[in-house]
Amino acid sequence: MSRGRPERAALEPDEVRDALLDGQSVDLLQALGLVTARGGASPSSNRKIKQITHFARLLAPALDDAFERHEDPILVDFGAGKAYLGLVLYELWMHRHGRGRLVAVESRPDLCERVQRIADARGFDRVDVVAGTIADAPLPERVHVAMALHACDTATDDALVRALEARADHIAVVPCCQAEVARQLKKARAEDIDPLWGHALHRREFGAHFTNVLRGLVLQANGHRVSVTELVGWEHAVKNELILGRRVARFHRGAADQLAGLLERVPVRPGLVDRVAALQASTGTTESAGSGSSSDTAE
């Protein structure tokens, strides 16, 4: 099986029901257009349902923690799109508990209208659809759980910066395509390790891996305990690396040093590094931001 062309299979109604989590309804999936009127799912919808249910399962400890510790926990879905994930999580937690709020950030007006329409029809009255980019959309001052599923290229970094800015207790991102570092690598020179990115394919793959490594270190260096895992199998998604951060308010000096060391070794400078350093400078915690790297930005 080709990694770039995941195997697909349709789901029969009983298979759809068996795939769902406790408290998750077929009705909502039908409203979202993922399940047919007879209760089945197409191959492409099968993939989405698998991703959503796996993400919900992996995010359950974070959401349970947020509901245990906060009276009105706020979940932000960055780059919500059609809000498949956000509305399913709303049903499983906010709707069930009768409290909490979902903030769905989406830049496309038609999708904003669609999400609000579905939320209203379902009686989900604690859904705020915010029209705007991840980088600029207005957010609550405090966020408890922040997530981004397949936000492309630097949009994932936008989500990380906004989540850190809002002091999110939990951060969960599944990055999608990542081109920023690959572009910088094309002009980078480090003679002893140049072969790592000498070919376009390797540059793309190495750049994506390197970007995610940096993202994890940035979170660690800024007060989060980090884990990295697979979201679903390759048969359901090609981009499926899940980066989870839990805020523990203990800045990892070792992670900051590793971050600086990697940026000295590999001559690139992703915008995330400087944006987080600026954020930490504005809050008076620059010593924990890993901003002391002397590496040069690739031209």
Image (cartoon, rainbow, N blue to C red):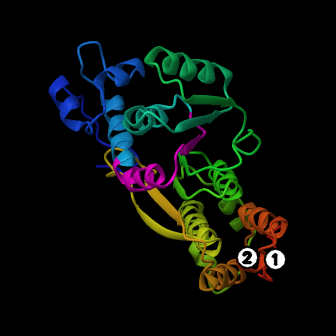
Residue 155 position (above or below residue 280): above
Q: Quadrant of residue 157?
A: bottom right
Identify residue for label 1. Answer: 296
Reading the image, the residue beneath label 2 is 267
Measuring from the top left, give residue 168's x and y in whole percent: 60, 56
Q: Nearer the viewer, residue 145 or 172?
A: 145
Residue 188 screen position, x and y as percent = 74, 72
Q: In what element is the residue under mark 1?
A: loop
How many residues crowd around disc 2 within 10 Å: few (fewer than 14), some, or many (20 or more)?
some
Task: Please state which of residues 293 and 203 is positioned toward the viewer in this rendering.
Answer: 293
**Three-letter residue code for mark 1:** Asp
Q: What residue occupies the far left of the structure in this picture?
A: 14
Q: Is residue 82 left or right of residue 2?
A: right
Check if mark 2's residue and mark 1's residue have beta carbons within 8 Å. Answer: yes
Looking at this view, is 106 or 166 the one in front?
166
Residue 145 highlighted magenta (yes or no): no
Q: Give the answer, above or below, for where 99 lies relative to 217.
A: above
Q: Which residues are magenta?
A: 57-80
Q: Quadrant of the C terminus?
A: bottom right
150 w.r.t. 171: above or below: above
Amino acid on which disc 2 is placed: Pro
